[in-house]
Image: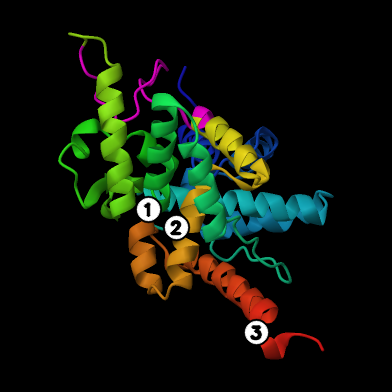
Amino acid sequence: MSLPPGTRQVEAFLEMMAVERDASPHTLSAYARDLADAENALPHGLMGADEAAVEAWYAGLGARGLSAATQARRRSAVRQFYRFVLGEGWRTDDPSRRLEAPGRGRRLPKTLGRDEVERLLAAASARDGAAGLRLVALVELAYASGLRVSELLGLRVEAVRRDPAFLIVRGKGGKERLAPLNASAREAVRVWLVARDAARPEKAPDSPWLFPSSSARGHLTPRRFAQLLDQAAVDAGIDPARVSPHVLRHAFATHLLEGGADLRVVQTLLGHADIATTQIYTHVAVDRLARVVRDKHPLAKDD
C-alpha cells in the first residue's frame, strides 16, 4: 500500500528534528500531530498546497476552538516543515512564508561559553583508553567545523587519513560545502585514528566510517553520542540539559560571530540556505557581549 502524499517528507522532517535538532519525543509527537492535521485539512496535502490554501487552513484553526498556544505550535511545525522541504529541493517555494504571529519573539538557541567547551574537552580527555580519545575527536570536530551531527557521525575514514585542513561535506539537499578543521581538531583526529586502527582485529576488514560501531548503521549513533556528551557534561560540572551534539554546532556559530566573523561566512560554514536562519546567532552573541560589558566594565557597576 502506498503512503499518502507528503507522508515520506513528513517522516524525513521528523527524523531530521530528532537527529539534528535533538527534539524530545514529546515535541516530535506534537509536530507529527500538527503536520497530520495540515496534511488532512489541505485539499492537496502539504506537498501540493499553495499559499492561499495554507493561509486558509491556519485561519481556520481559531474557528475550530484551538487555543492560541496550539495555533502557534501548528504554525511553527508547518513553517519548519516547509523550510526543510525547501532546503531539500522538494519544492521551490514556501507557501507558509506569510504565517507570522505578532508579538512573539524567536527562541534563542542554547549554547556554551568558551570556558565550558574547554571544560567539556578536559572531561573527555580524562577518560581512559580509546573511548576517551574518540570523544575528544568528536567534540573537537563538532566545535571546530560546525558539522550537523548526521554529517559528523557519517564521516568516512578516508576523508581524514591525509590530515586535511578542511572537509568537503555533503549537507541538506545534496549541497556541498567546506568545513574547516583547526590544528586542535586535526591532532585529536590523528590520535584517534591511531587508537582506532590499533583496536581493529588483525586481518579484519576496516570499517569505512571514522567512528565505527556495532549499530545497524555501522557507525556511532546520535543517541549514543548524546549519552557520551551527557556524562562528559556531568564530569565537567555542566548541566547535561544544556549540552547536546547540536549545541556544539550552536557554540561554533556563536563564538565565530563573537570573534567578529562575517554573518555571510558563518552562513556558508553552517550550510544554511537562508541567512535568516543564521541571524538568530547574532542575537545570542550580542546578548552575551552585553552581559560581559554589564558585568565587567567598571562604569557599568553600581557603587
Looking at the picture, tell me which residue is in the foreground, 144 or 90.
144
Q: Position of residue 163 (x, y in %)?
A: 19, 44
Looking at the picture, tell me which residue is in the foreground, 221 or 296.
296
Q: Are marks 2 and 1 in contact (CB under 8 Å)?
A: yes
- Residue range (magenta): 205-224
Q: Is residue 273 left or right of residue 37?
A: left
- Residue at which label 3 appears: 297
Q: Is residue 215 located in the magenta-colored stretch of the structure? A: yes
- Residue at which label 2 appears: 252
Find numbered disc 2 in the image and state the secondary structure of the residue it sits on: helix
Tell me: residue 2, above or below residue 32.
above
- Residue 23 seen in the current view: no
Find numbered disc 1 in the image and state the secondary structure of the residue it sits on: helix
Of helix, strand and loop, which mostly describes the magenta segment? loop
**Real-space CA distance between mark 3 and mark 2, rounded to the nearest whole angstrom:** 26 Å
Residue type at mark 1: give it: Ala
Q: From this viewpoint, which residue is outermost toward the left?
A: 162
Q: Position of residue 97 (x, y in %)?
A: 53, 63
Q: Is residue 155 left or right of residue 104?
A: left
**Real-space CA distance between mark 3 and mark 1, rounded to the nearest whole angstrom:** 30 Å
- Mark found first going from the N terminus, 3 or 1: 1
- Residue at which label 1 appears: 144
**Real-space CA distance between mark 2 and mark 1, rounded to the nearest whole angstrom:** 7 Å
Q: Is residue 166 located in the magenta-colored stretch of the structure? A: no
